[in-house]
Amino acid sequence: MDGPVVMAARQALETEDITLILPYVKEDASAALNSAFEKTLRARKAGPAARQVADLYFFETAVRLHRAGEGAAYTGLKPAGLDEGPVIPVAERAIKTGSADELTRMLKDTVEQEVRHRFDRVKDLQNYRSGDIVKAREYVEAMLGLEVWSHQLYQAMKAAPHESSHEHRHV
């Protein structure tokens, strides 16, 4: 478990400072998180096994409340080291360095490659023989696929944070 929510929750427990995790949940979830935090701090004093169980309870609560604030389902804690894909590390580097250049370049290049690939496929399939339903279906699938993908990509780019997709790491 090495995502930003769990890391903030872990740091909050170690320092006994709830303010380190509160920014990760919506204001209306603060009371529930604070209650879980207080219970966890008390339970941690009961020994190593209790501490481990209490910490896990707090991590799960923090991630569940965070996901609820995004309007997303809680799907459990994920183990550390999962492949998060190439863009998360680049985005994290951009934040750390204060420069969005690498992230912008990566996203621009990826979008350009995908658009060209999908567009070329549509162009390759558009000249099918009249009456060839199999080829016509391939063309329609590629054509609509490009249009729908383009629309969804545009919506994701214009969406407010956490509005477009809830598939980012929370562990």
Image: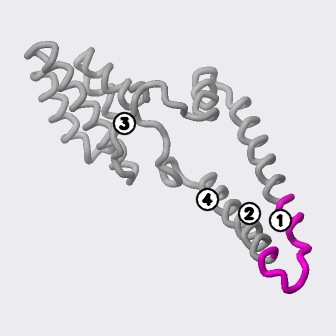
Indicate the secondary structure of the residue bearing disc 2. helix
Q: Which residue is mark 3?
A: 24
Dot in front, 4 or 1: 1
Which picture quadrant has residue 5? top left
Q: Measured from the top left, where is residue 80 in percent x and y?
A: 43, 25
Q: Residues within 10 Å of mark 3 (few under 14, many from 20)?
A: many
In the image, what residue occupies the spot 29% across and 43% down?
A: 65
Name the secondary structure under disc 3.
Answer: helix
Tell me where the magenta segment starts and ends, as one range: 120-135
What residue is at 28 percent from the left and 31 percent from the top?
59
Judged from the image, the secondary structure of the residue bearing numbered disc 4 is helix
In three-dimensional space, the C-alpha distance between marks 2 and 1, rounded to whole angstroms, equals 8 Å
Q: Which residue is mark 2?
A: 146
Between discs 2 and 3, the one toward the N terminus = 3
Q: Are marks 4 and 1 in contact (CB under 8 Å)?
A: no
Which residue is disc 1 drawn over?
Answer: 122
Q: Residue at x 69, y 33 (%)?
A: 103
Q: CA distance from mark 2 to mark 3?
A: 35 Å
- Closest to the observer, 130 or 35: 130
Q: Label 4 vs label 3: CA separation?
A: 24 Å
Q: Is 53 on the left or on the right of 161, as rendered?
A: left
Q: Decide which of tag 3 and tag 1 comes sooner along the chain.
A: 3
Whole-Å distance between the Cαs marked 4 and 1? 22 Å
Identity, as a three-letter code, of the amino acid under mark 1: Val
Under mark 4, the amino acid is Gln
